[in-house]
Image (cartoon, rainbow, N blue to C red):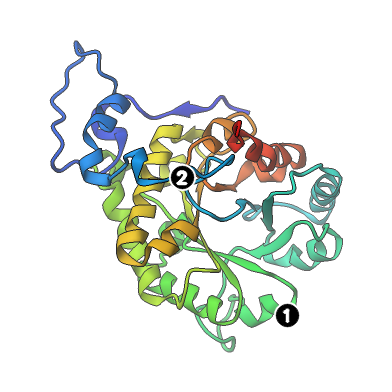
Amino acid sequence: MAMMSTISSCPQFCGLRLSGLSLKLDQSQTLSTTQFFFQHVDSHLHLSAARRGCRGVITMAGSGKFFVGGNWKCNGTKDSISKLVSDLNNAKLEADVDVVVAPPFVYIDQVKNSLTDRIEISAQNSWVGKGGAFTGEISVEQLNDIGCKWVILGHSERRHIIGEDDQFIGKKAAYALSQNLKVIACIGEKLEEREAGKTFDVCFQQMKAFAEHVPGWDDVVIAYEPVWAIGTGKVATPQQAQEVHVAVRDWLKKNVSEEVASKTRIIYGGSVNGSNCAELAKQEDIDGFLVGGASLKGPEFATIVNSVTSKKVAA
């Protein structure tokens, strides 16, 4: 496995909205990008720790249970998936974690019939309405029929390769929720958007499309997945991920409600693996992970699930 690399080398790439921040730093200055950001960002994002009370022994800003999803994407054969399911069935997983896996459509029934009930099943996509003459699509009703509990919507590969736009994704989420299928709602910026300081703008626009359509947030998990970190081996630093997660939570507070902001889980995805998950999990606003390639390896996925222990601190 390639060594993890991080992107944190220049001030504009700390990744957020740049307006109102003075970024006139040169290499002779010793202030790091992250230090500089946190000295100036409080008035913009209200990141002060004083805004939250003590949350006991778990360092989580959200009040929901730690959540780890495995997105198997377009990978696997009957034999390799049988081996993966066997590894997951034999893994020792921490009890205080919601665990979900998303096999390819054609293997959902195989996985559902052989995987431990400890792990729930998600689809990787669903149609925007009731089934019918929509060649190649999978309806929410069909997913319910085979026992799926979740669906991943808005993944960057659906947005940027297939061409799904924000409004279409929002409508898909609304329909899934209306049929009692829970939603992992993905957001995230491309590399050029981060470099241009548009991370917040992009994520907030994607959040707005979900908010305009979904009937409620009880069955929604938000997955922040910077596109530049998906499958690239590059991963946001814990600080970079935390910056966006806290901003998304503040957006929910301001645009939906304080209760929704507290209850909604915001998970991180983008080259998460067994080596970097513990440090990411320590961040207060990271409520879990959506895992790609590493979810195809049972023992490593179990390590990521069990990174919840990194959140536990002395009482």
Mark earlier in primary sequence (2, 1): 1
Disc 1, SS: helix
Q: Residues within 10 Å of mark 1 (few under 14, many from 20)?
A: few
Give the residue at mark 1.
Answer: 145
Which sits in the foreground, 194 or 90? Answer: 90
Tag 2–tag 1 contact (CB < 8 Å): no
Q: Residue at x 61, y 29 (%)?
A: 275
Q: Is residue 264 above or below residue 247?
A: below
Q: Residue 44's spot in the image, x, y percent? A: 22, 44
Crowdedness near tag 2: few (<14), some (14–19) or many (≥20) residues, C-alpha within 10 Å:
many
Q: Nearer the viewer, residue 113 or 62?
A: 62
Res 194 → quadrant:
top left
Where is residue 157 shown, x and y percent of the image?
Answer: 48, 56
Taking 24 as reference, is 251 left or right?
A: right
- Where does label 2 land, which residue? 285
* Amino acid type for the residue under numbered disc 1: Asp
Residue 9 lies, with reference to residue 289, above or below; the image says above
Label of residue 87 in the image: none
Depth check, front residue: 287 or 12: 287
What residue sits 30% from the left and 34% below the top?
A: 14
Side of 209 where 282 appears, left or right: right
Residue 205, by quadrant, is bottom left
